[in-house]
């Protein structure tokens, strides 16, 4: 894992900013950076600017601290050091840091995997006991609807319809819970994001009426296909669109964009060779009411929902599918809407097993 380095002089001017620092901070590296004040160079990262501003005021600087960059969602681990002259006087500060976002994602995946194992054991134990009674209730209510004593009673028919509807909904929640705790087995193929988004829009509109919502989909030309599971990716973006449609309550705008992102350090590049992989970034943005601050850390949790008829699995499944593709999902939300940003590698770990041109089939196939 490569280190980012930023060195600033006593008067706050940038003396050095290496390529890895430019990548993490998502700024264009050029000769004009050196000599500019760090607050202008890092203007998009006010949290980092505050850390550097305090560096000259502290006698003991942070060592192995962590910081989440609010503008990009990246997590960095950093160390600050004074740069001293031959007389021991501080003439500047050096910031050494690493992008820990991938490490944090791996740790979160392990935690999620542990939770799913426990949840799976519980779900498997109760599913049989719950599904059979639900099926019995649904069948019995259906038989009662056709009984001569109630066929002529609109009130009885309405109540029986409610019973059948509620039984089906409960059965669907049990089914979704069982599907959620099962490990995802990706059927990997070259997948065009434009096709995925087109299918996702169609599926979302069949599940939640769009009504007066204005939907815009923009996909950059020349976007590379990714190694992914078409069906799972469709489910991912269908769930995000359904979430947006439900938040809008029939009015407003939803904007979906797809573009090629900045190359990122390979999640599996443990050899330290500095290999980067191309990425595709898909954003689903709405101008709805946004997510309350106190709920933002919980929206990807399984079975957490604020909707009366929600199962609480929609965004949890989104997170699970993103993780299975070695991707990342970030959320920006406020009073004027919510934006989900999904970053997917063009080729993931599954690409290792794709036959390469020119290799004998005996080396790649059973």
Image (cartoon, rainbow, N blue to C red):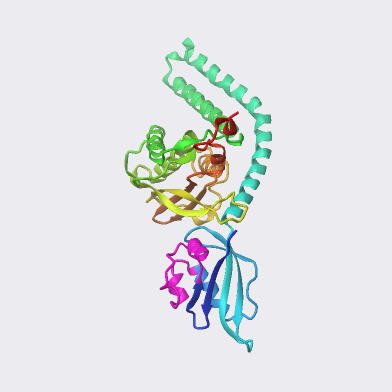
What range is drawn magenta here? 17-46
Q: Is residue 56 above or below residue 169?
A: below
Give coordinates of residue 41: x percent, y percent.
44, 71
Judge whether 295 appears above or below 113 on screen: below
The residue at the point 44 percent across, 67 percent down is 29
Furthest residue in direction top, as rendered: 148
Q: Position of residue 164 (x, y in %)?
A: 50, 23
- The percent coordinates of residue 271 (x first, y second) are 62, 53
User: In the picture, residue 151 is in which quadrant?
Assistant: top left
Q: Nearer the viewer, residue 173 or 307?
A: 173
- Residue 44 lies in magenta, yes or no? yes
Whether residue 236 appears in this view of the structure is no
Give left or right: position of 215 versus 303: left
- The C terminus: image quadrant: top right
Residue at 43%, 52% (x, y): give it.
261
Q: Pick the residue in front: 209 or 348.
A: 348
């Amino acid at each position: 894992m490569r280190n980012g380095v930023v060195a600033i002089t006593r008067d706050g001017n940038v003396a050095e900013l290496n390529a890895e620092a430019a990548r993490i901070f998502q700024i264009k590296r050029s000769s004009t950076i050196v000599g500019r004040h760090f607050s202008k160079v890092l203007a998009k990262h006010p949290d980092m600017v505050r850390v550097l501003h305090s560096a000259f005021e502290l006698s003991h600087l942070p060592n192995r601290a962590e910081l989440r960059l609010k503008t990009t969602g990246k997590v960095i681990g950093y160390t600050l050091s004074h740069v001293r002259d031959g007389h021991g006087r501080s003439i500047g500060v050096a910031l050494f840091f690493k992008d820990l976002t991938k490490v944090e994602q791996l740790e979160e995946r392990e935690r999620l995997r542990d939770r799913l194992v426990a949840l799976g054991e519980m779900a498997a134990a109760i599913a049989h006991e719950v599904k059979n009674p639900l099926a019995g209730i649904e069948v019995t209510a259906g038989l009662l609807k056709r009984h001569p004593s109630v066929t002529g009673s609109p009130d009885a028919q309405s109540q029986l319809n409610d019973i059948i509807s509620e039984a089906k909904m409960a059965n669907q929640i049990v089914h979704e819970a069982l599907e959620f705790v099962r490990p995802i087995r990706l059927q990997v193929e070259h997948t065009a994001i434009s096709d995925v988004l087109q299918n996702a829009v169609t599926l979302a509109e069949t599940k939640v009426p769009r009504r007066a919502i204005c939907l815009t989909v923009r996909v950059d030309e020349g976007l590379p296909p990714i190694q992914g599971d078409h069906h799972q990716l469709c489910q991912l973006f269908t769930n995000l669109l359904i979430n947006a449609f439900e938040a809008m309550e029939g009015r407003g705008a939803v904007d979906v964009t797809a573009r090629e992102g900045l190359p990122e350090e390979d999640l599996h590049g443990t050899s330290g060779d500095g290999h980067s992989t191309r990425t595709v970034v898909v954003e689903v943005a709405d101008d709805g009411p946004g997510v309350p601050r106190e709920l933002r850390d919980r929206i990807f949790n399984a079975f957490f929902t604020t909707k009366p008829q929600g199962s609480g699995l929609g965004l949890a499944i989104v997170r699970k599918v993103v993780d299975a593709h070695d991707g990342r999902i970030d959320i920006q939300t406020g009073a004027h809407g919510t934006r989900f940003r999904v970053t997917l590698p063009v080729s993931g770990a599954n690409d290792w097993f794709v036959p390469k041109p020119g290799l004998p089939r005996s080396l790649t196939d059973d």
